[in-house]
Amino acid sequence: MVLDVMAWVGYATIFYFVAMQMYLLGLTVVSGFVLRRNHHLRRFNRGTAMLSSTNAPPVSIVIPAYNEEAGIVDAIRSMSIVKYPRFEIIVTNDGSSDGTLDALIEAFRLEKVRIPYRPDLDSEPIRAIYRGRSGVDITVIDKANGGRADALNAGINAARYPYVFCTDADVVLAPDCLVHAMRRIVDDRERTVGVGGNVRPLNGSRIEMGHLISASVPTGLVPRMQVLEYVRTFLASRPAWSQLNALPLVSGAFGIWRRSTVVDVGGFARGHMGEDLDLTMRVHRFLRDRGDEYRIVYEPSAVIWTEVPNTLRVLRRQRIRWHRGLMTAISDFKGMTFNPRYGRLGMVTWGGFFLFEYLAPIIEFIGWVVVPTAWLLGALSTQALVSMLVLAFGAGLANSLTALLLDESYGYFNSPVDTSRLVAMALLENFGPRQMTVMWRIRALLGGSATRSWGNMERRGVANLAKPTGTAGTG
Amino acid sequence: MLDIRIAEIGTFVIYLTDVALLLLLVGLKTIHRSRMRDHDRRRQEYLGVLSRHVSYQDCTDPITPRMAGDSAFLDALIDVREVLSGYELANLEAIVAEHGVSAGLVRRLASPFPLGRRLRAAVALAEIGDKTTAPAMIHHLSDREPDVRVECARGLARLKWTAAIDDIVARFAIEEAPVRARFADSLVGFGSKATWPLLAYARVNHRAEDAGPALALRTIGRIRDLAAADSIHQILEEGPSLEVTIASVEALGVIASPYSVEKVEPLLHDDRWQVRAKSASALGQISEPSSVPWLSAALRDVNFWVRRNAASALAQVPTGIEALYDALEDADPYAADAAAEALADAGELVAARRRVSAGSSGDEPLLAHMESEA
């Protein structure tokens, strides 16, 4: 009887795994069509006509900074030369204990000012506001430490323009990313309230003076694994969600929002582990409940490069935090899960999130325990076990390879060396990294104080990424 | 047994899929790289041929039909077209006509080819700018593919083919917002010739819908046709919707006719804060000194954004700086802060610091404000 149950649990986990892969495959097919069309349009560089247009709405770039002394100045410099007619940069120094503020004051000749600051959104107290005199339209808000969401709220409060571009201090913007993203807003100004961009790992690429000179796949296994994950996420899933107008997540590293909408929903949730997911879902719920016709879209041509964790320790902390954020969001928006009132968002994407993101580590963990045990106890034949493993690994591999095929049109990692590194990673990730990620997510599910801290991302700084690790500054 | 058989079949299918995907990936990457290299080589070669042909009419370098149909030739043609003028451009147009390049593209546009090839043909037609293709582009303004329609509108605008303006404006009522926005971009390319069809569309439709007429009005603003101001005033007098009112005021601000001042000033008392805020900005763009009292009063508006826009506007009006200095003493801290920000943006803060460092003994209220606690 026990053996039968074990065998059936084993089959159920395999069935679940196949269903998940079919769901992902469906998304990948839709994304393929979207990216194909996008490829034709991008090839002819259609967005840049907006550069000389008075039609381009001005944008406030909001950057939260906590102990970012190593790279903040280079990051701001790279942002300040982005191609867009009118934008301002707002840096929120979130109570840094290093020299972040001093570095900014020196580099951009900041001076203390008293200018309008409207506390539409809650944040920790503001200590001072600085404005630059260096030719870069920069405002620095110095405030007590309150976390990323809190810092973003303070930056949004100070924003002068109707659209806010929320990003991070450890990113390099592709020069035309704002043009591509804002083009989506100009195209449908009345309905578009948010635009997400295509985030790519920066590690391993060549950066000079805040610019990406050449992109390549990092040699380290930890960042390389993330390159593959980012390609899967940003090219195989998000274009499809956006096409369905059911994008559940505008990434924290690249999110452009209509300021008034963010204020309407109360801004970023302070202390939330997944504040970007939470904001996106709250905007969806708010506008759908109000009966508004709106769009939150993803623009794959709007590319931003970000530093991803280089070590397992930092990656573990990040993944636990992400899963905690997901758990909170699943609980907060449980009324939307498989609720037809929320259309494709409730039925397809948020339902998919619940089934294949939230439940995945639990079911996968059960599978990893039960299937080998059932085999050891003789409930499963060796042939069945091997078939299941090949099925599980093979489907995951197929998913990764399809995503890499979609990436072909972007041409960032086209060299034979990069291709072989990513293919090798797609094969390798089934033997260790995947199980490790499951364990981290299980750890997040178990809770405890260790899973509630943000921890520090050890930053090398944008300018130092091309240098050997030994010379890196830490945040 | 059955379960094992299903698992075996599943395993086999997945295994096969993986191998196929892997081969496809490697194959595609290899083919892509090789094709790109070859394309670039041919493009360079054609650039040379075309440069010689446009410079010397008697050039004997052959342009074969195979070359004329090559996508690399088309790319080279578009590149060369961008930098030519005068007799060289005429020579290039002769080459295009002689070798039937445009005719081939028109045929391709009408073919059942997939989007990629048809879109490429539409883009090439828009870039080449051959007048003989205008009727075909007008026809494809109603193409089944939105992107092809957009490219045809762009091509017609590049040709300044004014006969197409009515066709493009007529589609404002039919098209989805993204296509309509791109059509608006094209209409700007026609200049003031597009003003009246757009105005007519806005006046006729603004009671029935918001988005189309609002976009039409913004497009008129981008054209900056002074002659349109009076008609926009009339639309404003008809009491349009919020969206259309905002677009009208925005257009008047960009056009910046001094005659618009008396129409926009009363809107600073509109019930809707969005209209008041936009009106303040528009008055700043128009920059008439007579607006200063109105904008100074708007510094005490109940809405923060109206106060902020009014302060920015005052900084743009020649005699507005004094009013901003007066506002530094305002009891409303937001009005005072907005005035301080506008003064700083106008360079007054730097000037004040210079005066102090040069030993000026006069009061510097802006410096005092900036150094005070919020």
Image: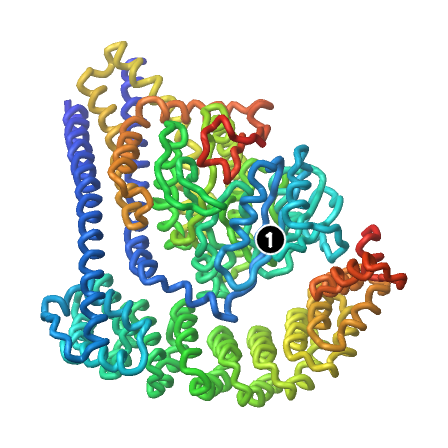
Q: Which quadrant is the N terminus of chain A positioned in?
A: top left
How many other residues sit within 10 Å of disc 1, few (<14), some (14-19) or many (≥20)?
Answer: many
The residue at the point 57 percent across, 77 percent down is B254
B131 lies left or right of B347: left
- Where's residue A42, x and y in %? 34, 58
Reply above or below: B105 against B23. below
- Where's residue A421, x and y in %? 29, 32
Residue, disc 1: A89
Q: How is the image coloured?
A: rainbow
Reply above or below: B60 against A396. below
* Front-most of residues A142 and A377: A142
The amino acid type found where label 1 is placed reads Ile
The residue at the point 21 percent across, 47 percent down is B33
Would you identify the image quadrant in which residue A290 lies? bottom right
- Where's residue B31, x and y in %? 17, 47
Under circle 1, the secondary element is strand
A181 lies left or right of A386: right
